[in-house]
Amino acid sequence: MKDKSDILRLAIATYGTPAQEDMMLEEMSELTKAILKYRRLDETDRKGAEGFVRRGHIREEIADVQIMLDQMRIIYGDTSECESYKLERLAGRLGLE
């Protein structure tokens, strides 16, 4: 298999930035819907087969969103500094300073 970065860059080059931005929004929406469907299950269904299937669907949608996030980082730049700042801020809110 080709390098992940090469595949992501080729997708951006092939489909274009606007299309990949649209796909990012679509994938985030699908993840949102999958989580909401899972949350609507009662406790018994969450622990049973239906919950198992829905959690699998959520994992699939997370993967789709992550792939699109990786493309967004290529398009918009590295997010490491922002992530570090936001994690430090969260740690402070959690009393972990």
Image (cartoon, grey):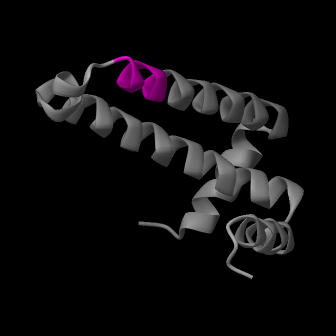
Q: Nearer the viewer, residue 80 or 24?
A: 80
Stretch of the chain drawn in magenta: 34-40
Q: Nearer the viewer, residue 52 or 45?
A: 45
Q: Residue at x 30, y 37 (%)?
A: 55
Q: Nearer the viewer, residue 28 or 12?
A: 28
Q: Is residue 55 magenta?
A: no
Residue projecting furthest to the front: 95
Residue projecting furthest to the bottom: 97
Instruction: Give the image quarter of residue 84.
Output: bottom right
Residue 29, position in %: x, y? Answer: 61, 25
Q: What secondary structure is the stretch in magenta mostly built from? A: helix
Residue 47, position in %: x, y? Answer: 17, 34
Q: How many numbered dots are placed on residues in this image?
A: 0
Quadrant position of the N terminus in the picture: bottom left
Instruction: Give the image quarter of residue 75.
Output: bottom right
* Residue 74 horizontal side relative to residue 24, left or right: right
Q: Is residue 40 above or below residue 21?
A: above
Q: Residue at x 47, y 22 (%)?
A: 36
Quadrant position of the C terminus in the picture: bottom right
Q: Residue at x 78, y 74 (%)?
A: 88
Instruction: Give the image quarter of residue 83.
Output: bottom right
Q: Residue at x 55, y 27 (%)?
A: 32
Residue 44, position in %: x, y? Answer: 16, 25
Q: Is residue 71 above or below residue 89?
A: above
* Residue 48 horizontal side relative to residue 63, left or right: left
Q: Is residue 38 magenta?
A: yes
Q: Is residue 91 above or below residue 35?
A: below
